[in-house]
Amino acid sequence: MEERGIGMAVIEAGLSQNSWLLLNIKSVIEKWMSKSSAQTMVQAEGFVDRRDTDDRRDARPTVVDKSNGQEAVRLGLFQKPVDEVVKWGRQYSIWPLPFGTACCAIEFMAVVSSVFDISRFGAELVRFSPRQADLLFVAGTVSYKQTPILKRIYEQMCEPKWVIAMGACASSGGFYNNYSTLQGIDIVIPVDVYIPGCPPRPDGILHALIKLQEKIKKS
Amino acid sequence: MESSIAIKKLKEHFPAEIASESCFRGDDTVIIKRERIVDIMRFLKTDKELSFNMLMDIAGADYLGREPRFEVVYNLYSLPTKMRLRVKVQVPENDPSIDSITGVWKAVNWFEREAYDMFGIKFRNHPSLRRILCHDEFVGHALRKDYPLSKGQWLSGVYDPRGTIPVKEGDSIKAVSESKDMKSKLLTLNLGPSHPAMHGCFRVVLELDGETIVHATPEIGYLHRVFEKSVEKGTYNQAIPYTDRLNYCSPLLNNVGYCLAVEKLIGVEIPERAKYIRVIVSEISRIMDHLVCLAASAVDLGALTNFWYFFNAREKLTDIVEKLCGARLTNNYTRVGGLSHDLYDGFKEETLAALKFMMQAIDDVMRLLERNRIFIDRTRGVGALSPEDAIEYGWTGPCLRACGVNYDVRKAHPYYHYDEFDFEIPLGENGDTYDRFMVRVEEMRQSKRIIEQALERIPPGPVKIDDRRYVLPEKKDVYTNIEGLMNHFMLIMEGLKVPQGEAYGFVEGGNGELGFYVVSDGTGKPYRVKVRPPCFAIYQAYPKLIEGRLIADAIAVMGSLNIIAGELDR
């Protein structure tokens, strides 16, 4: 029964976009484990924390504590498969926020449409609310006037979040080296994947998405 | 010659005000003194014989080192007589001010704000003279020749575009809310710039009474990419890639428009084959523009299926364009003096097949929408504008024709043999969202007719003029003989030399009259290029269209206007 419970929870976590759900699940697991202390545990000596993203900054042991190792080992043991499944889920259910400002947005529309069909990669559900999205697709030129808005939208997104800079303008300002254009969005927000091109072909956008999925998997 | 009537009449009525007059490449220009500008403009508009009822454009210009340093250029157009007149006023550097003509045409407001923002020309009695393209914290005036091109200025935070409106102004929000004593009831809602229906870069601050819009303040300039200053730094041909990114839904139309303006300034005629090809690519581009507009505006109304149908058709056309130019979106196909290269083999068959597919898509979508209760209820009578107002605001293109005004550059001022093609101009009746949608649909069908005729009639021959002053030599000449090599070197390094003067070239763009006002000082680089963006004039009327209606209507209207940020903000 308990195993099935965890399995359900994990799937839910994988499909959900919100990190608070993940935290909930963690606490569920912890509670469950404290109840079923009779379970036999395998010592995982070599376990080292793989990742410390912002959503999991809260107390989490990174090295096995011999004196009081029971708790930490338990956590580590379950953390790994849970993490893997969560990552798998995140990887194939990216919800992008298209911050489309210019020509690139038209190409983004082409990617969403049926010929190129971004839904083959599990990222077709575009959300225009930053609270519901986990991938910021900056498609187009960002001017200094637009910069505070971009920053605010990035800050409003929940962790974990990723950013793709689509096209030359978002990556570096492109051939708009002038008083109005921000010379690359990485000056103000972190970027995970850059796509070259002015604008990039839809294939390039899909390639970037695959790269991002690899990054999520490795993270 | 016809237009000199205007100048003659001006001389009669305002003999002391005319400083000089000229006619260059068919463009009548008159330079007047600034004191009585309002009277002169009102005369030009109201005189029965002249009736310049449209203000097409106001351009600022900076002639650094000359006194008076600045120039304000008004481009007027008369619908009944089809005359054009360029009125220039020179203003000195120490007192760069001139009376505002906002009372004469409704279109003036934003154009004057732009001239103020870019050149610091102060328009006296302007209702709210504030920056429009640059942000509020910007210091200096960007298009002045002594402002460095790449000197960026940071903005500290998002600001309220209404903040600087003077309270005394009659239609400002504070005044509205106070006069009607509903200050406590009005709710401020910020729409955009990152909003699905605001297409990326538009921001409107709405004052709501319940769900009804009482007042709307649009803020633009979020995609200001400095087209006009950037092209001054390169040669004439180097400006063509920048034109791609003006109206990025129909880049080829921009290419054609810009090259047409420069060729007019030079005074060359391109070969027949190039003309026909330009017609074909223009119309393909127009269809693609309308497909994006209709697909997006249908999505805004919740009709997602149409988006798939239209984008499938658009992909077919994109493939053709890509095969022709090498790029899907930013085509960069035309050159001053012709085209970069000829059509490829099999272009005709592929285009006809794609057009057939497009017609099928239109039929599919029309079956879904034409008698769709929801669609009709959301669009009929929504955002209607009267023909008089549309002309006042300087509307052109499908939006103007939806109001029932028959003005299409292709018919009124035919270029590239448009007068020889058999096609019709669809007109609307009510000027509402529904009419704008349907006019665009019908225009696509007419464009198809034009393309088919052009493909039939296209003659063989060269696609560039044979003039080594303007057009690059063949590659084999560059590699084998010294003349070709030097010729190539000079054209690349210094650019083609355009004779001193100025011209206004215009085509029917995707959204209306797309004009380029090009000033040359005789060197290889343009001195000043001013785009006449159709969207700029159309979007200015947006508050008028949505005030008194629901928020949902604002979205429907926005989609049907097809405002393209790249062109609006340049």
Image (cartoon, rainbow, N blue to C red):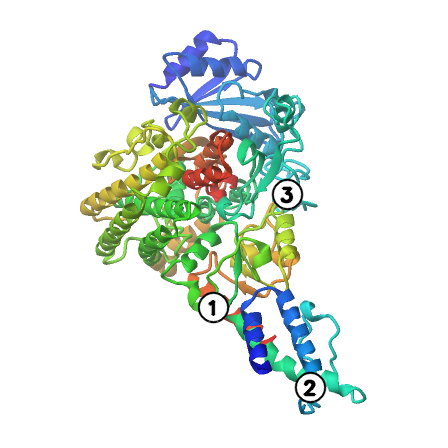
Nearer to the camera, B255 or B358: B358
Q: Which mark is residue A47?
A: 2
The answer to whether the residue labelled 3 contacts the one labelled 1, judged by CB atoms less than 8 Å apart, is no
The residue at 38%/54% (across/down) is B484
Q: Amino acid at mark 1?
A: His
Where is residue B9 shown, x and y percent of the image?
A: 41, 11
Where is residue B252 shown, x and y percent of the image?
A: 37, 47
Q: Quadrant of residue B93?
A: top right
Distance CA(mark 3)–CA(mark 1): 38 Å
Q: Which mark is residue B148?
A: 3
Nearer to the camera, A39 or B166: A39
| Residue at the left extreme of this rendering | B456
Question: Closer to the camera: disc 3 or disc 2?
Answer: 2
Distance CA(mark 3)–CA(mark 2): 57 Å
- Crowding around mark 2 (Cα neighbors within 10 Å: few <14, some 14 to 19, many 20+) is some
Q: Which mark is residue A207?
A: 1
Question: Closer to the camera: disc 2 or disc 1?
Answer: 2
The residue at 67%/68% (across/down) is A55
Q: Amino acid at mark 2?
A: Phe
B112 shown above or below B487: above
- Crowding around mark 3 (Cα neighbors within 10 Å: few <14, some 14 to 19, many 20+) is few
Chain at tag 3: B
Where is residue B282 shown, x and y percent of the image?
A: 33, 44
Q: Quadrant of residue B398?
A: top left
Where is residue B501 shown, x and y percent of the image?
A: 45, 31
B442 shown above or below B66: below
